[in-house]
């Protein structure tokens, strides 16, 4: 009978893993399932090491009283939380074996603050087990109960039989997230979604209408020669921080970084709110001003950014060989956008748009600065400079 029940448990976990899209609802489902079992679980905690540019680990905490899953992300460079070396996590990470604390009400004066918090919240028994992934990474899963007398031993035997199933399910969620995060980090959100949808054939693409942004640093070679390789990377990271968040916040997508240059687009999609590239540029200008203020304070030279803006129909799709592809936007319009940014080097304005961009996103934000012959573009193009505010003067170059 016990074996049949264990098989039922395995089928339930497998069904949850097959139905729920991410780790958060899966852990919530596991918490609800274990809380109704003989173990009477009141608390589930999962800690996963992650491959992510912003943080090194993520923890999930489910409690029966709230039934929600609280997620905490631990940034890179952050030292281990206080008490880690006295904690169950450290014990399991190093021993690769389960760790149990029975009779929590009797645990007093321990250096691990977790036990005191659990005791004060009414928990009586605590068990942490390792989730060892295929690559040898040790992650952890813990359960706790408020059941008088702690976990029943028969229930723990059944729970231990399920650890391998838990590990496979959670590793699957972790792998899917790693793929999604990695693609999003290196390709951008929209391009990564297209890849995940299976659009990975050379030549596949679609015509879209989009605002385009091309920006690069004026005098980058001079900055690089003064800063050296390490300082140059720090400068680029600070500079790109000024651009990426505003672009994405206003409905845009960063397609690629080309040295010190950035190419982004703002697609016009039916049924979706229009993006706001003008709002993005204004936010970029403010962030760059803050960056330059900080650089002035340290005696460093300011960063001058040249931005070109254009609006047109372009092809969004795959370019490359059968073995190496790039998701990008293609068309003469991309060249026009880049040449607008290039034109700022000879102007007193750093944010320059074409007439097509101004007509689509608002003439109130720009002032005309004449017709210009852009390099490599057959016909002269009417250009406009970003206004300081609606109806105000154009914004000149940084001093």
Image (cartoon, helix red, strand yellow):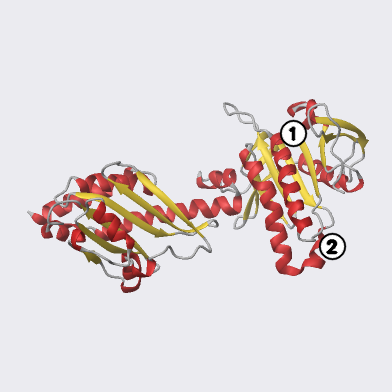
Residue 141 figure quarter: bottom left
Q: Looking at the image, is 268 positioned above or below residue 234?
A: above
Residue 2 figure quarter: bottom left
State the residue position of label 1: 312
Name the residue at the left extreme. 1
Residue drawn 75% across and 43% down?
285
- Cα distance in 3D space between marks 2 and 1: 34 Å
Foreground pick, 67 / 18: 67
Tag 2 and tag 1, C-beta contact below 8 Å: no
Residue 93 left/right relative to 290:
left
Residue drawn 54% across and 44% down?
193
Image position, residue 247 (x, y; %): 66, 42
Q: Label 2 crowding class (10 Å Cα cut-off): few <14, some 14-19, many 20+?
A: few
Residue drawn 69% across and 52% down?
240
Mark 1 element type:
strand
Residue drawn 74% across and 64% down?
232
Q: Looking at the image, is 42 positioned above or below residue 310?
A: below
State the residue position of label 2: 222
Residue 37 left/right relative to 208:
left
Residue 193 left/right relative to 351:
left
Name the residue at the bottom extreme. 95
Image position, residue 152 (x, y; %): 12, 57
Which of pointers 2 and 1 lies earlier in the amino acid sequence? 2
Mark 2 element type:
helix
Residue 309 left/right relative to 343:
left
Q: Label 1 crowding class (10 Å Cα cut-off): few <14, some 14-19, many 20+?
A: some
Foreground pick, 81 / 49: 81
- The answer, for residue 253, to whether it is visible in the render is no
Image position, residue 192 (x, y; %): 56, 47
Image position, residue 295 (x, y; %): 76, 57
Q: Give residue 200's mark.
A: none
Mark nearer the viewer, 2 or 1: 2
């Amino acid at each position: 009978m016990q074996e049949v029940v264990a098989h039922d448990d395995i089928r339930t976990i497998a069904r949850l893993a097959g139905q729920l899209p991410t780790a958060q609802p899966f852990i919530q489902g596991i918490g609800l399932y274990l809380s109704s079992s003989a173990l009477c679980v009141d608390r589930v905690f999962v800690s996963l090491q992650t491959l992510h540019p912003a943080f090194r680990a993520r923890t999930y905490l489910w409690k029966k009283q709230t039934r929600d899953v609280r997620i905490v992300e631990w940034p890179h460079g952050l030292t281990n939380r206080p008490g880690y070396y006295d904690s169950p996590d450290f014990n399991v990470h190093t021993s690769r074996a389960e760790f149990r604390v029975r009779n929590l009400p009797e645990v007093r004066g321990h250096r691990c603050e977790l036990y005191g918090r659990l005791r004060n919240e009414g928990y009586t028994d605590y068990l942490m087990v390792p989730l060892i992934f295929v690559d040898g990474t040790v992650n952890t899963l813990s359960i706790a109960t408020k059941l008088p007398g702690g976990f029943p031993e028969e229930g723990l035997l059944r729970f231990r039989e399920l650890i391998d199933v838990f590990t496979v399910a959670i590793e699957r969620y972790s792998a899917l997230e790693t793929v999604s995060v990695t693609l999003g980090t290196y390709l951008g959100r929209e391009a990564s979604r297209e890849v995940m949808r299976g659009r990975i054939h050379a030549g596949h693409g679609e015509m879209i209408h989009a605002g385009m942004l091309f920006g690069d640093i004026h005098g980058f070679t001079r900055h690089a020669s003064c800063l050296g390789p390490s300082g140059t990377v720090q400068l680029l990271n600070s500079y790109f921080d000024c651009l990426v968040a505003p672009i994405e916040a206003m409905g845009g997508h960063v397609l690629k970084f080309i040295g010190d240059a950035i190419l982004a687009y703002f697609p016009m999609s039916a049924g979706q709110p229009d993006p706001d590239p003008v709002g993005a540029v204004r936010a970029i200008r403010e962030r760059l001003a803050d960056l330059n203020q900080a650089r002035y304070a340290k005696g460093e030279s300011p960063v001058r950014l040249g931005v070109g803006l254009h609006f047109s129909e372009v092809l969004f799709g795959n370019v490359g060989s059968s073995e190496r592809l790039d998701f990008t936007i293609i068309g003469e319009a991309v060249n026009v956008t880049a040449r607008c940014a290039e034109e700022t080097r000879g102007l007193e304005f750093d944010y320059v748009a074409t007439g097509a961009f101004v007509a689509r996103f608002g003439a109130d934000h720009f002032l005309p600065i004449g017709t210009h012959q852009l390099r490599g573009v057959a016909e002269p193009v009417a250009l406009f400079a970003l206004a300081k505010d609606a109806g105000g003067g154009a914004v000149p170059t940084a001093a």
